[in-house]
Image: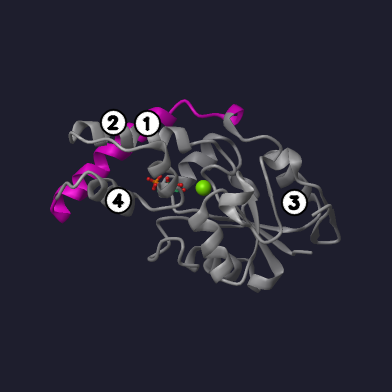
Amino acid sequence: MYRGVLFDLDGVIVDTAGYHFEAWKRLANSLGTDFTTEQNEQLKGVGRVESLQMILKWGEIVKTEEEQASLCIIKNDWYLDLITHMNESEILPDVKKMLDNLKDNNVHIALGSASKNAVTILKAVGLIDYFEAIIDGTKTTRSKPDPQTFELGAEALGLDPSECVVIEDSIKGIKAAKLGGFDTIGIGNPINLNASVVTVADLTELSYTCDDGKLIILDK
Ligand code: BG6
Ligand code: MG
């Protein structure tokens, strides 16, 4: 049982992975390169600059630090264009139901995301008020799979990692949580993710109950 839940954002709360892919692909193509959907999987959970550096490496393209900074701005502008229309219809299945359940039962809720757009997105989809703590790409210095994002999340909730569970859709995010001593629930493919508690296709498949400040996962 858990007193706190740390949610990743992209791919767990909202399905923004496709928008990230579209914007990166446009940027890669503009640089005369491309990348595959398999390579894109490796970008999940990875911060903006590091993602660019991986795409440049795959395309054998060299850019200075300054050029990389401008390319990240261009990608983010394209990404922001793609997400401007976002509203609550883009919240993934049963996310709101789970947040309501946790809140009604006094289970603590935090966000642990690499995205610097997290607050914008949470506001756009109307979920920002559920989060007692938001640890996003503006608050961290080390990317997943480093556990810093989740460690800061647990600390902000006043909980020990052993009292929290992390919900993640990326291999790097699950690894980060495990390294920080957190239990993990995976969203996606169980073979890739290897989460410690259970991996489900989406939250409609997660059996749980909340009682007296605690989340209990059923039917593992
Ligand atoms: C993660 C995504 O949540 O955030 C990555 O999985 C993304 O794909 C990263 O690169 C950084 O996001 P942003 O919004 O700051 O560019
Ligand atoms: Mg994610």
Q: Earlier in the sequence, mark 4 or mark 2?
A: 2
Label 1 SS? helix
Occupied quadrant, residue 144? bottom left
For disc 3, the marked residue is: 103
Could you tell which of marks 3 and 2 lies nearer the N-terminus?
2
Q: Nearer the viewer, mark 1 or mark 3?
A: 1
Relative depth, front residue between 23 and 198:
198
Distance from the alpha carbon under mark 1 to that under mark 2: 6 Å
> Which amino acid does the dot numbered 2 rest on?
Arg
Q: Nearer the viewer, residue 44 or 126?
A: 44
- The mark nearer the N terminus, 1 or 3, is 1
**Secondary structure found at label 4:** helix
Instruction: Name the one closer to the observer, 52 or 123.
Output: 52
Q: Is mark 1 within 8 Å of ligand 1?
A: no
Residue 54 - label? 4
Residue at horizontal 31%, vertical 33%? 25
Q: Position of residue 65 (x, y in %)?
A: 16, 55
User: Which residue is tagged 1?
Assistant: 22
Asked if the residue under mark 2 is in contact with the one under mark 1, i.e. CB atoms within 8 Å, the reply is yes
* Stretch of the chain drawn in magenta: 63-89
User: Which residue has dot 2 on it?
Assistant: 26
71 displayed left or right of 205: left
| Amino acid type at mark 1 | Glu
Q: How far is the residue under mark 4 from the one under mark 2?
A: 15 Å
Residue 55 horizontal side relative to residue 86, left or right:
left
